[in-house]
Amino acid sequence: MNWFSGKAALRYPVPPAPRTAVLVPFLRPAGRVRVFPDGWGAESRAFQPSALAADWRQLRALLGQEIPSLTHAIIVLAPGPDELLSECQRRDLWRAFRVPVFEQIVAENGTLLAAECEAHEGLHVESSKLEAGLQPAAGFQPAPHGLALEPCGCGRSTPRLKLLHRDREQHVLRHFDNVPLRPR
Ligand SMILES: [Zn+2]
């Protein structure tokens, strides 16, 4: 049996995927997307990826490195809504690599639960499993994310996870009558 059997492939944010190096072991390779289960190293560098998919811990370790082949995108893979990037972390990635950042929430078997689109206005919820865990809380609880229900700039109108940290975002969420999420 193959080591990647049963796993899902990376869903590239804006297909078709260019040469992409996946640095986590829970996705399988497909097309020009290759998986490097041991993370970044000589092998993945030699592959000369135009895009990288990795978790924040791995990307943080790469912030000081030059990756000249990286021209398309960074896909940040988070295990849950509580692990999504802060504005600061996104800024660090942009300063280091100067390519668009797309966040995704991916389950342990590689199933995509939520994904940021090219409009960069939150993460579209892709799985009812995730949505079920995001129902509004009964009492007031400060939650870092909310569900945005208004149509997205990309043309889809599925619910999206959005950051509630910034004033602008809070205003947007209130304006569209969005619901706060129950903290984990
Ligand atoms: Zn969208």
Image (tube, grey):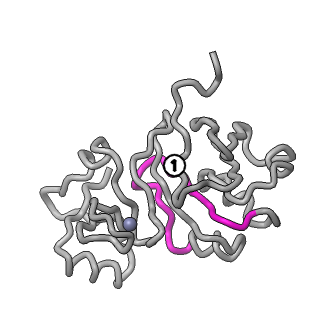
Amino acid type at mark 1: Arg
Res. 95 image quadrant: bottom right
Q: Is residue 63 magenta?
A: no
As displayed, is residue 31 above or below residue 58?
Answer: above
Q: Residue 69's x, y, as percent?
A: 79, 62
State which quadrant residue 177 falls in: bottom left
Residue 86 is inside the magenta segment: yes
Please report the residue visible at 30 percent of the width from the left and 55 percent of the height from the top: 183
Position of 62 relative to 127 (above/below): below
**Magenta residues, start to end:** 70-88
Closest to the observer, 92 or 48: 48
Q: Residue 13: give x, y in percent of width and height.
A: 51, 58
Question: Residue sitting at 69 percent across and 42 percent down?
Answer: 34
Q: Please give the name of the residue rendered at 74% of the width and 59% of the height, measured from the top-left corner.
A: 62
Q: Residue at x 47, y 55 (%)?
A: 83
Report whether 41 appears left or right of 12: right
Q: Decide: few, some or many residues near mark 1? Use Cα within 10 Å; few <14, some 14-19, many ≥20.
A: some
Which SS class for mark 1? loop
Disc 1 residue lies near ligand 1 with CB under 8 A: no
- Residue 89 location in percent, x, y? 57, 69
Ligand 1, seen in the image, is in the quarter at bottom left
The residue that label 1 is drawn on is 11
Say if 132 sits above or below 146 in the image.
Answer: above
- Coordinates of residue 124 in the picture (x, y in percent): 36, 59
21 on left or right of 9: right
Q: Is residue 11 or residue 138 the one in the foreground?
A: 11
